[in-house]
Image (cartoon, rainbow, N blue to C red):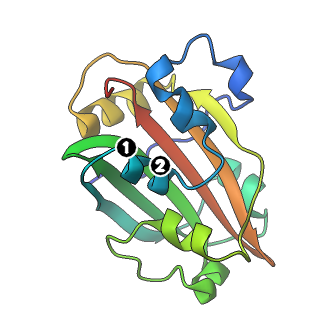
Amino acid sequence: MLKYPISLDFNWGSFEQVADKAPENIHDRLLEQGSLTALLKSQSSSFRVKVINEQHLTPPAYICRLLGDAMETAICREVLLYCDDKPHVYAQSWISLEANQYGLKNLGENPLGDKLFQQSSWQRGDLEVGCVEDADAQLKLWQLFGVTDIPVFARRSVFTNHSAKVLVCEMFNSEIE
């Protein structure tokens, strides 16, 4: 179990800013506008979610800027998404306490993406992408993925339902074909 969530504090921008650096095998995942869960399920014969950690935390300032500066506590959910028994994605979500009233409480090993895309009241904000350059974050991700020295690319977006917000960030194992 991770002591504290992997830092998401790195440069975020458009896909075009990282397209030439990101391996082609993850381009479809970085660009997917629909449910990543649905995409992963369609590309594999088995899919599962492994919860690494889920806890109430005070979000760091860079998360509060996305979810609302007045936010004092949120649920930080960290999971690995497995396709065919291999870890493809580390996902970290920051769920406002208000979002729980929209069916996001106690998800267990159910995919958050299923809930967000099954309810039309959730609206997705802009999709941003980036390359994980922080050495500590890279090391933790390599350990979770069971790999060494690969580039890790990520995407994030904020989902909104009235005033409830959820930040979803997905980091991809680029070694997977």
Asked whether, in this view, residue 155 is left or right of residue 142, the answer is right
Q: Amino acid at mark 1?
A: Gln
**Which percent across, then down, holds residue 131?**
56, 25
Mark 2: few/some/many CA within 10 Å (<14, 14-19, 20+) = few
Q: Quadrant of the N terminus?
A: bottom left
Q: CA distance from mark 1 to mark 2?
A: 6 Å
Circle 1: element type: loop
Query: Residue at 33% of width from left, 51% of height from top?
Result: 80
Circle 2: element type: helix
Asked whether, in this view, residue 58 is left or right of residue 49, the answer is right
User: Is residue 3 in view?
Assistant: no
Q: Nearer the viewer, residue 176 or 10?
A: 176
Residue 8 in the image: above or below residue 165: above
Residue under label 2: 39
**Which percent across, then down, holds residue 130?**
61, 29
Residue 53 in the image: above or below residue 153: below
Residue under label 1: 43
Q: Nearer the viewer, residue 80 or 4?
A: 80
Query: Residue at 25% of width from left, 50% of height from top?
Result: 45
The answer to the question of whether label 1 and label 2 lie on touching residues, with beta carbons closer than 8 A, is: yes
Mark 1: few/some/many CA within 10 Å (<14, 14-19, 20+) = few
**Which percent across, then down, holds residue 177?**
33, 26
Query: Residue at 75% of width from left, 68% of height from top?
Result: 160
Q: Amino acid at mark 2?
A: Leu
Residue 162 in the image: above or below residue 9: below
Asked whether, in this view, residue 156 is left or right of residue 29, the answer is right
User: Is residue 174 in view?
Assistant: yes
